[in-house]
Amino acid sequence: MARHVLVAVDDSEQSTDALEFACEEYSDATITALYVLDPGDFYAVSGVEGTAMANYDEIQRHHEERAEEILEAAREQAAEHDVELETDHVVGSVSRSIVDYADDNDVDHIVVGSHGRTGASRILLGSVAETVARRSPVPVTIVR
């Protein structure tokens, strides 16, 4: 039985389903919801030209506020199952950050949604869930 489960969260329906699954299946474990801020998204807002550097701090602050909103929604969702959820956010490549977080924080199981990212980033970067499953040092459950 898993002792520490990491659930990757974002604002997708698949992420919500993944957290729901973790709360139902691993209610006795420590569950941590992790939101990854992809630095590429900071620049996508205003482009990589001159204004991006000038507004980088403001753009990052906006993304961090959004991350906190998503993590608060995750805590509320877990509370509906009487699960006290630990939360964290990191900045970095999404799949690499999830795997590194699991490795660095004594996680023994990862739960991810199947298609959290959408659009061009998913096409260009491939599936986060697939990459996590291939690189993870611990078992991964992909929730569809």
Image (spheres, grey):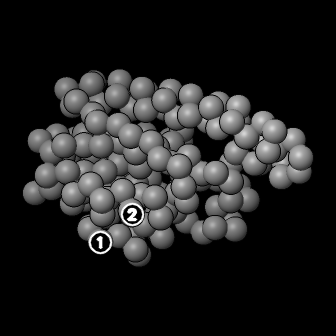
State the quadrant of the C terminus: bottom left
- State how far apart marks 1 and 2 are (Cα): 7 Å
Q: Quadrant of residue 56?
A: top right
Residue 99 is marked as 2
| Extreme residue toward the front, this view | 54
**Nearer to the camera, 13 or 140:** 140
Q: Position of residue 33 (x, y in %)?
A: 36, 42
State the quadrant of the N terminus: bottom left
- Whether the residues at callouts 1 and 2 have beta carbons within 8 Å, the answer is yes
Mark 2 burial class by Cα count in 10 Å: few <14, some 14-19, many 20+: many
Instruction: Tell which circle, 1 or 2, labels the residue nearer the N-terminal end.
Output: 2
- Decide if residue 140 is in sight here: yes
Determine whether, in the image, residue 25 is placed left or right of residue 135.
Answer: left
Residue beneath the point at 83% across and 52% down: 48
Q: Position of residue 32 (x, y in %)?
A: 30, 43
- Three-letter code for the amino acid on which mark 2 is drawn: Val
- Three-letter code for the amino acid on which mark 1 is drawn: Pro
Determine whether, in the image, residue 11 is placed left or right of residue 44.
Answer: left
**Nearer to the camera, 14 or 54:** 54
Q: Position of residue 70 (x, y in %)?
A: 49, 32
| Extreme residue toward the right, this view | 50
Residue 137 is marked as 1
Determine whether, in the image, residue 111 is placed left or right of residue 72.
Answer: left
Residue beneath the point at 47% across and 64% down: 96
Residue 46 is marked as none
Mark 1 burial class by Cα count in 10 Å: few <14, some 14-19, many 20+: some
Q: Quadrant of residue 75?
A: top left
Residue beneath the point at 35% across and 70% down: 136
Q: Which element carries disc 1, helix, strand or loop? A: loop
Q: Position of residue 37 (x, y in %)?
A: 56, 46
